Image: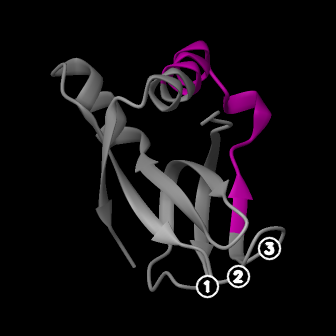
Amino acid sequence: MVGNFRLATKFAVGFSQYVYENVFFDRFNSIFKGFYLVISEQQLADTIKNNLVVTFTKIPSTECFGSQDVTLLEFCDPREMTHDRQKMIYFLNSVIKTENYRTVGGY
């Protein structure tokens, strides 16, 4: 898979009963189903600091390929996209590429 993570100050989708704040997220699709991988900025920082395996919250998508089921999305202000945050996105994309991560279900 290829990652394309983005940083959101607020994020929620149709199947989620939570509004996630300050999270990196990406959507992955197949023809029949999709899901989001989400990790908070603080959780990722702690994971990197402690040299642990990245663990994403996996949220099912409500629709098939090509749909848009995000109910709330506020992207991080580009002026707040620090070099450290850019490195975190690069790190997450490489984690996806190498498939060196875990997931837990979340709603």
Q: Marks 2 and 1, how far apart in space?
A: 9 Å
Indicate the quadrant containing the C terminus: top left, top right, bottom left or bottom right: bottom left
**On screen, residue 101 above or below 28:** above
Outermost residue to the right: 66
Amino acid type at image mark 1: Gly
Q: Is residue 22 left or right of residue 41?
A: right
Secondary structure under badge 3? loop
Identify which residue, 47 or 61, lies in the foreground: 61
Dividing the picture into quadrants, the one containing residue 95 is: top left
**Image marks 2 and 3: residues in contact by CB distance under 8 Å:** yes
Indicate the quadrant containing the N terminus: top left, top right, bottom left or bottom right: top right
Magenta stretch: dominant secondary structure: helix
Amino acid type at image mark 3: Gln
> Bounds of the magenta span?
73-91
Other residues around mark 1 within 10 Å, as few (<14) / some (14–19) / many (≥20): some
**Image marks 2 and 1: residues in contact by CB distance under 8 Å:** yes
**On screen, residue 83 above or below 80:** above
Residue at 37 percent of width and 59 percent of height? 57
Q: Marks 2 and 3, how far apart in space?
A: 8 Å
Q: Is residue 45 left or right of residue 12?
A: left
Secondary structure under badge 2? loop
Q: Which residue is mark 3?
A: 68
Dot 2 or dot 1: first in sequence order is 1
In percent of width and height, residue 85 lies at 55, 25
Q: Which residue is mark 1?
A: 14
**On screen, residue 49 above or below 100:** above
Q: Which residue is mark 2?
A: 63
Dot 1 or dot 3: first in sequence order is 1
Amino acid type at image mark 2: Glu
**On screen, residue 86 above or below 42:** above
Residue at 59 percent of width and 62 percent of height? 10
